[in-house]
Amino acid sequence: MTPTGLTKDAGWELGVRRTVPLPSQDVWDYLIGPGRRRWLGHAELGTNTGDRYTTADGVEGEIRGFTEGQKLRITWRPTDWRHDSTLQISVRPAASGTTIGIHQERLADAAERERMLTHWTQVMDKIMEDLAAPGE
């Protein structure tokens, strides 16, 4: 039996999803704008494939894909990793609002997957808190 999170082609992966009762464009604007600090830190982030970024914590990467209002794919490499992973942030309309998705793949092993799953779950909790507090 294949362990949870192990893929045939992309190594280890994880996904965290939550739905908020807000229009998808509002959620997207938050994630790419002021909410970016929640998941990326205080790094500047372009919108063109190949644009590079570095966070205050030393995570480095580049944009691999950007679909306005829907999806952002970037590479993600903390200073203590010897490999890149791929991180995707997405928004999709849902019956009760908008579903936010955080997906990360090309993780090294089960332990790295668990650490990053904990990290992204905590990040998503903070995003949900922000989106539940109108006007802030």
Image (cartoon, rainbow, N blue to C red):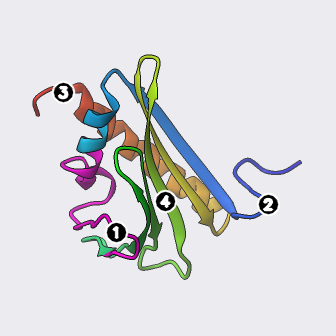
Task: Give the x, y percent position of residue 62.
Answer: 40, 73
Q: In this view, does 98 lie above or below 113?
A: above
Task: Give the x, y percent position of residue 13.
Answer: 63, 55
Q: What element carries label 2?
A: loop
Q: Is residue 40 above or below residue 31?
A: below
Q: What element carries label 4?
A: strand
Q: Which residue shows up at 75% across the image and 64% down it?
A: 9
Q: Which residue lies furthest to the top in this view?
A: 96
Residue 133 is marked as 3
The part of the chain drawn in magenta is: 30-52
Residue 8 is marked as 2
Mark 3–mark 4 distance (CA, rounded to whole Å): 26 Å
Mark 2–mark 1 distance (CA, rounded to whole Å): 29 Å
Q: Residue furthest bottom?
A: 82
Q: Name the residue under label 1.
A: 48
Type of amino acid at the residue the image marks with label 3: Ala
Q: Is there CB contact under 8 Å for labels 1 and 4?
A: no
Q: Name the residue under label 4.
A: 87
Closest to the observer: 114 or 29? 29
Mark 4–mark 2 distance (CA, rounded to whole Å): 18 Å
Q: In this rendering, would 52 be left or right of 116?
A: left
Task: Give the x, y percent position of residue 123.
Answer: 37, 46
State which tag comes first along the sequence, 3 or 4.
Answer: 4
State which tag comes first along the sequence, 3 or 2.
Answer: 2
State which tag comes first along the sequence, 1 or 4.
Answer: 1
Mark 3–mark 1 distance (CA, rounded to whole Å): 31 Å
